[in-house]
Every structure is written in structure tokens, then in C-alpha cells.
């Protein structure tokens, strides 16, 4: 069984990982934290981009000042400019009072611009000026406001493609990516899954006062073989769901959702033909059946009952076929 989480000091927002690529990223964070160079964090959704931004801020000399986060992709275009730069009373219909923007609120601290790739070209121009001059005007004002801030941006988009398509300014990209950090998807750092699982279990135990729970070795093997399209966020959501719905102390394979046994990243191989393989029809069919069985067992971490469900056959039939094909010793 996987050991229970410990009782050492715990921070729910910690960035967890010990694989080489993560250790290298954390080393970069240590080196740049006290510099004011702009950072661009890229990676798929759910890989922990905001956690890295928080870690940079917490290690910097600005840690006692505000860290202001803005999800640029979640704010409608017509509101984003006001959200970032503020506006004067009467600047537009509905502007009933003065509004201080996020850049002003972040003065002397750090601003984190998440989903920067979703910002429209008009606002990109104003962002470029802030990066160059650290100054801007509120909407409806001619007074220039200067700020002393550290800018960290993040995106899950390929900005090279956005630049080629004319949707993102190349000069803004270079201003943002003085220090580029790319976070790997969870499927490329699976050795960190047990650490992350223990971290999330302890988070629930500490923050929500839930009882200690753990995963059986077999259940953890399933987690290790899954491709995690939603990355760390998907893993955390799974842990929380199991902790709420499963009463017993040890999570077993039977407790896991069916989606974990359907590895969409690796589909079944295409059938071979006798002409391609220089073999008879019966031999080609047997070889293809062997490929299907091996793939199903791989996608279900060797759990025969789940592999049989995936192949839509009885478990006893699968076991007999494995025995006939001398596959039983592999699982």
C-alpha cells in the first residue's frame, strides 16, 4: 500500500514535484525571484502556472506587497480594459464612479496576468506600453499613472501560432518572455503522482478535517498509467471526489471511475494484413488479438476485470486467451 501522508508542515498552495524537469524549474524560480524581469509561464491548463507565479512572488523582495491576479480569459473584452487600467467617473455609460484598476492595486507588488493569449489586440497595445514605461492612463483620463510592479504572465496557448495568425503582437511576446518557463503536462512527470496524491490527501485532512486515507498499490498503479488530460487539476478533483464519496480508509481499484481505464492517448493498434506481415490469415488474426489484449491490459494497469470490460468480453475468456498466448506471466 501507499503510505499515509505525514504530519510535517503543510502549505495547501505549495508546488509539489521532484522529477528533474520540475527541479530545474524550481531552480529557475530561485534565480529570478529577486529580479524584476518579466516572466512568461506556458503550459497546458491545470499544470500549476499560477502556483509558480505565487512562488516567484513569495520568494521575491515584493512578498510583503500585493500579488494581484487577473484571469484575462474570464473577463469580457468590454470590461477587461477597465479592470486592468481603471476608469474615471463618467468615462463611459455605466461608469457611475471612479474605479482603480488592477495595475494600480499591484503597485510595489506583482501582477499575474493569466491567459494572456486571450487578450485582444487593442489592449495588447496598452500592455506593451506598461511593460516599456510602467505607466498608463485610466479610461477617460489624461493623467499618467506610474507604477512599480513585477509582471508575470501565463497562457495555455501556443503564442507562436497566435503571432503567425496575427492575433498576438510579436513585440509584446518578446517583452513578456524575458524569462520563459514551460510547465510539463502531468503525463510527462508521472513519477510525481504519488507525491501529489499524498499532498492532496493531506490538504483535505488539514483544511477540511477529513480522516486520513490512502490508495492501495493496485489503485495507485491505475493512476500512474492514466494519461491525465486535465493534468494536476484533474488529479486533485479526483482525490477530493473519492474522499467525499468513499467511506473506507483505503481506495481500491473498484472505487476509481471508469474514465481512468480508458486511455485515449494510446488507442488500439491498426490491424495488420497477411500481405504486410507475410503470414496467413489465422496468424494475422491471432497477432492482432494479442495486440488488443496487451493494449487493454496496459490501459487498465493490468487489472484483468477492467481490461475485459474494455474489450467487451468475460474475464474468464480473457484469462483463457492470455494463457493460450503465454501472456499471463506478464501481468
Image (cartoon, rainbow, N blue to C red):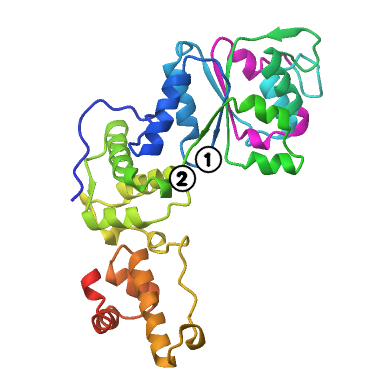
Residue 269: x, y in percent? Answer: 46, 73
Which mark identifies residue 43? 1
Q: Is residue 128 left or right of residue 90?
A: left
Residue 279: x, y in percent? Answer: 43, 89
Distance from disc 2 to disc 1, alpha carbons, whole Å, reads 7 Å
Residue occupying the point 77% across, 14% down: 89
Image-quadrant location for residue 326? bottom left
Question: What element does badge 2 sit on?
Answer: loop
Give the magenta-colored segment's residue range. Answer: 97-122
Query: Does 73 sit above or below residue 269?
Result: above
Few, some or many residues within 10 Å of mark 2 (<14, 14–19, 20+): many
Residue occupying the point 44% across, 24% down: 29
Question: What element does badge 1 sit on?
Answer: loop
Q: Quadrant of the C terminus?
A: bottom left
Residue occupying the point 38% across, 70% down: 295
Q: Nearer the viewer, residue 219 or 192?
A: 192
Query: Does 212 sit above or below residue 135?
Result: below
Residue 5: x, y in percent? Answer: 22, 38
The answer to whether marks 2 and 1 mark residues whose Cβ atoms lie closer than 8 Å is: yes
Disc 2: which residue:
185
**Total marks in image:** 2
Amino acid at each position: 500500500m501507499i503510505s499515509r501522508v505525514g504530519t510535517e508542515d503543510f502549505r495547501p498552495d505549495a508546488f509539489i514535484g521532484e522529477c528533474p524537469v520540475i527541479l530545474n524549474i524550481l531552480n529557475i524560480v530561485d534565480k529570478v525571484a529577486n529580479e524584476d524581469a518579466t516572466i512568461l509561464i506556458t503550459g497546458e491548463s491545470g499544470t500549476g502556472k499560477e502556483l509558480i507565479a505565487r512562488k516567484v512572488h513569495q520568494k521575491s523582495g515584493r512578498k510583503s506587497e500585493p500579488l494581484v491576479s487577473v484571469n484575462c480569459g474570464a473577463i469580457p473584452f468590454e470590461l477587461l480594459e477597465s479592470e486592468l487600467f481603471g476608469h474615471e467617473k463618467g468615462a463611459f455609460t455605466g461608469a457611475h464612479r471612479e474605479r482603480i484598476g488592477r495595475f494600480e492595486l499591484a503597485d510595489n507588488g506583482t501582477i499575474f496576468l493569466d491567459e494572456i493569449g486571450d487578450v485582444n489586440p487593442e489592449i495588447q497595445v496598452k500592455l506593451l506600453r506598461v511593460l516599456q514605461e510602467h505607466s498608463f492612463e485610466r479610461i477617460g483620463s489624461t493623467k499618467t499613472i506610474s507604477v512599480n510592479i513585477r509582471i508575470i504572465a501565463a497562457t495555455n496557448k501556443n503564442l507562436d501560432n497566435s503571432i503567425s495568425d496575427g492575433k498576438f503582437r510579436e513585440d509584446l511576446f518578446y517583452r513578456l518572455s524575458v524569462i520563459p518557463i514551460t510547465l510539463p503536462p502531468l503525463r510527462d512527470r508521472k513519477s510525481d503522482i504519488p507525491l501529489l496524491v499524498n499532498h492532496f490527501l493531506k490538504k483535505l485532512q488539514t483544511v477540511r478535517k477529513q480522516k486520513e486515507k490512502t490508495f492501495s498499490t493496485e489503485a495507485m498503479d491505475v493512476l500512474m498509467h492514466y494519461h491525465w488530460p486535465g493534468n494536476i487539476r484533474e488529479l486533485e478533483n479526483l482525490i477530493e471526489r473519492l474522499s467525499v464519496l468513499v467511506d473506507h480508509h483505503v481506495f481500491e481499484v473498484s472505487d476509481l471511475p471508469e474514465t481512468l481505464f480508458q486511455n485515449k492517448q494510446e488507442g488500439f493498434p491498426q490491424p495488420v494484413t497477411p500481405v504486410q506481415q507475410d503470414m496467413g490469415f489465422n496468424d494475422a488474426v491471432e497477432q492482432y488479438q494479442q495486440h488488443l489484449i496487451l493494449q487493454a491490459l496496459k490501459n487498465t494497469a493490468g487489472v484483468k476485470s477492467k481490461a475485459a470490460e474494455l474489450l467487451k468480453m468475460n474475464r474468464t475468456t480473457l484469462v483463457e486467451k492470455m494463457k493460450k498466448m503465454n501472456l499471463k506471466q506478464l501481468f
